[in-house]
Image: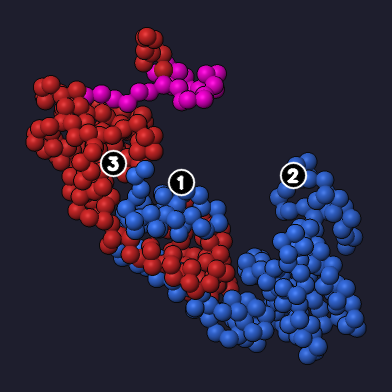
Chain colours: A blue, B red
Amino acid sequence: MLQYARPLQRVIEQLQRLPGIGPKSAQRLAFHILRCGPQSARELGEAISALPDAIGRCSICHNYTEKGICEVCSDPRREQSMLCVVGEVSDLMALERSGEYRGLYHVLGGLLSPLEGVGPGDLTTAGLLQRLEEGGVTEVILATSPSVEGDATAEHLRQLLSRYEGLSVSRIALGLPVGADLDYQDQVTVARALSGRRLMD
Amino acid sequence: MLQYARPLQRVIEQLQRLPGIGPKSAQRLAFHILRCGPQSARELGEAISALPDAIGRCSICHNYTEKGICEVCSDPRREQSMLCVVGEVSDLMALERSGEYRGLYHVLGGLLSPLEGVGPGDLTTAGLLQRLEEGGVTEVILATSPSVEGDATAEHLRQLLSRYEGLSVSRIALGLPVGADLDYQDQVTVARALSGRRLMD
């Protein structure tokens, strides 16, 4: 059967390896890149090629960074006594977008998942405990997603952290999303919103 | 607000310019590229960078090709008297996948669309007429998509080609797709299937 010219076929195959990109999308993207001409193809291609070499993990919190220590950890205006534990860097960014949090982070680099073979040793838990040993942190917020994996990870960390006396360990609130219609929420969310109810002042 | 490290932000912005890729997908793709490491990022990046310089248009039919003349036009086993006219190279590939057609092609490079400012001068119509002037072609199949633009383009070409005596000009059949449920088809498709009915032998 007729194939696309080799360089085009190669781009289509490479794009298909990306998550959520099937054969049709890969073809459409490749045609778009072709149409936009050499300069924008080079801009995109070079940005992608350079990415993994340009970006590393922060040696303290495992956030992505260009330097050894990330922007958050090296910011002295951040509240140094609070630590928010998240699964991935994208979760950290979601919390930053809320504008509500001014402390430090710790990125686990995943969530516990026996099905996918992710155990405690695959996360950056050791680094987290070391940060707590060094002192100065008085509050830890477990902000893993409210999924089976996120809940299991939070519970695992709660047990690990229980031996630090005087350390306050909390879990981000589960409940109704703002603007939601109670009638349209799933029953687990409604149950969690009920059990997590707070007294009104 | 906190931004991703610059090389990461750059890839996310570049990916967002591609069709069908929003901020969330761009972020997910960038994270995937990061996780897969330097080698596969370089493979993808270099394939993209090199694409527009490596691929040109066939000087006869305007198919994409690495050489001056594409694989179809340079294949002597192809039926030289039949010409199938399509809008884009992806349409040519769809016809090839059917395995039903063994003639040559002509890629218009688009479809007439007054709304998007595509007029007859933006298509490769001149090249098509020149091929017909040169002789040897006895049948032209207009295989533009059955959309408003595709139908208008086919009608425009039919008028242009009517001055070639002895040239058979046909339009690909419109009707029900194979495996379709009559009940679920839109009324225009059903109307076209009725008006395009064929005598059974």
Residue topped by disc 3: B110
Q: Residue furthest bottom?
A: A134
Label 1 vs label 2, nearer the camera = 1
The disc at residue A24 is 1
Residue B158: x and y in percent read 21, 26
Q: Chain of mark 1?
A: A
Which label is found at residue A181? Answer: 2
Give percent across and percent down for residue A157.
82, 72
Residue A184 picture location, percent across and down: 75, 42
Tell me where the magenta segment starts and ends, as one range: B169-192
The type of residue carrying mark 2 is Asp
Q: Are marks 1 and 2 in contact (CB under 8 Å)?
A: no
Kind of residue at disc 3: Gly
Disc 1, disc 3: CB below 8 Å?
no
Q: Which mark is residue A132?
A: none
Task: Specify the amino acid type for callout 1.
Answer: Lys
User: Where, by quadrant of the figure, is residue B96 drawn?
Assistant: top left
The one nearer the camera, B81 or B20, is: B81
Residue at the spot x=32%, y=40% of the render? Answer: B92
